[in-house]
Every structure is written in C-alpha cells, then in structure tokens.
Amino acid sequence: MVVVPLRTPAPVLPRRERPARLPEIVPDPVDPPHRPGSAGEHVLQDQVGSVARADRFYGDQLRDRLLPRMVEFIARMEMAFVATADGHGECDSSLRAGPPGFVRVLDEFTLAYPEYRGNGVYASLGNLVENPHVGILMVDFTESLIGLHVNGRARIVDDEVFRASFPAAGGEESGGRRAERWVVVEVEEAYIHCRKHIPRMERVTQRREWGTDDPARKGGDFFGAKGTPQRAPRPARRRFPSTTHLGGGASRALRRRPHSR
C-alpha cells in the first residue's frame, strides 16, 4: 500500500528581504564529480586544509542507507534530537523520546518516528510542510557512548495510514499515548558521531509524566517567560571576522551527491 502524505503541497512563501549576497563560489572543475557533502563543507575544508581527512571520513563512514549495526543501535534508542528548517532556512531543533524502539526502521532506506499531541505549535512538522529535509541525531549516553546521524527527506503520515501501510512496524501506544501521526524519513545519509566528546550518563529509575497536560507536571513556566515582554530592544551586534559566505541556497545548488539507488 502506498503511503499518502496528509499535507497539501508546500505553500508559496512570501519573499523576505535579505542582504546582498556575495558572489557564489563555483566548485573547482578538478574536484571529484560525486564528492559527498555541501559546498560550504568543501570551502571550509579547503581553507583549513582538511580535504584529505574529510574524504577519509566520507569514504569510511558516510553511507546512503542504514547498515545492520545502525539498525540494532536505533532499536535501543529512547530519544532522538530532530533538526528542521522552514522554507527560508530558519532552523529549529527538538527532542523526541519513547521506549526503546520508538523509532522504527521500516527498511534499510526508511525509518519513522511517532508524533504525539503536544503544545499545538507544530514547529518541527510545520517546517517539514515547507521543507522536507530533516536531520536526526541519536546518542547512546550510557553504554557505547556513540551517536548516529541520519539525514533525509521526510513526509508526514496519519497514524491510521501508517498502521495500514506498515503493519509489521506496529503502532502500539507508548505510555498510554497513541501517536497522532508519523514522520517517515527516506534516508539520504547515515554516519557515526564519535565518542570523543560524549559524556557518560547513568540510567536512573524516575517516574515520567507521559502525555500529561498538567502545567506543573510538564514543566509549566520553568524559565519564567510568562508575563515578560515578547520582544526587547536588541543591542548592536558585535562584529566578528567572517568566513566566506556562499549566500542562501548555494549549498543546495552546489551539493553533489551520488544517487545510485
């Protein structure tokens, strides 16, 4: 059965005024024709002299699918950090959590994670409506001290459609909650996050208020934001020397990844 996205086609977004762009950097014609990574990565690698080191990482660790050990790793994860951006490139990051296996691997090229009822803002899903690119980071803080990056293209699927389309993946409730919808991700990149700077944590038994709407139990006004002005006068920005700026959209235009599958 074909998975049908619930969202309508991405809306045409109003143009925003942007500062004049610097000339875009054209890739060197002697570069490999299918070198992974973005144009920005390549520019900085060239500037700092890390091209050979980066190419070793691309060749050794960057894959366009989930390898068996990655699948096993995902099955143990209880949380994932999710990064999205809207159609203008303005970013948001969020946290998703659940019991081990709440992120489902549907096949080596596809994974999915559930979306439960939240604060009604839909920051992450709203971004995906405009821009399907998503970056997911899962980290094992207690055992292997290793992280896994998964980047890809996402679509939003209703829970009933997901259950019917992927019955083997299951759709059981978590902590008394049932997912409203699922984010299905077509994997484009999967690679390791090394343990060098990952802190070790210890697992503790603590009651978690899954799905509660009680303001105090879910954190309430922890940061004291309620009642303060939404906006305040902003001091002049301090100027720092900048690295080369490619301009909005250049990375996408110059990105060169093989599409062999």
Image (cartoon, rainbow, N blue to C red):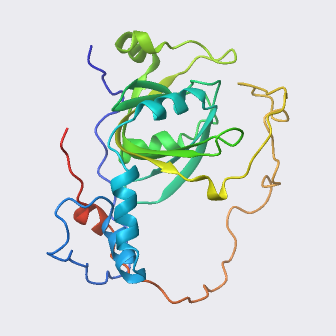
| Quarter of the figure that contains the C terminus | top left
Q: Position of residue 60 (x, y in %)?
A: 37, 52
Quadrant hosting residue 65 = top left
Give above or below for 158 relative to 185.
above
Q: Position of residue 21 (x, y in %)?
A: 32, 80
Q: Position of residue 76 (x, y in %)?
A: 60, 28
Task: Using the image as rendered, state which of residue 185 and residue 37 is in the foreground.
Answer: 37
Task: Using the image as rendered, state which of residue 188 and residue 155 is in the foreground.
Answer: 188
Give above or below for 175 relative to 227.
above
Q: Position of residue 128 (x, y in %)?
A: 41, 43
Residue 56 is at least partly visible in this image:
yes
Relative horizontal placement of residue 101, taking residue 245 as reference (left or right)? right
Residue under the point 57% across and 25% down: 102
Quadrant hosting residue 105 = top left
* Number of callouts: 0
Relative horizontal placement of residue 153, taking residue 225 as reference (left or right)? left
Give above or below for 119 relative to 12.
above
Task: Using the image as rendered, state which of residue 223 and residue 46 is in the foreground.
Answer: 46
Quadrant hosting residue 10 = top left
| Quarter of the figure that contains the N terminus | top left
Relative horizontal placement of residue 229, taking residue 168 as reference (left or right)? right
Residue under the point 39% across and 65% down: 54
Residue under the point 15% across and 75% down: 30
Residue under the point 34% across and 64% down: 55
Residue 88 is at least partly visible in this image:
no
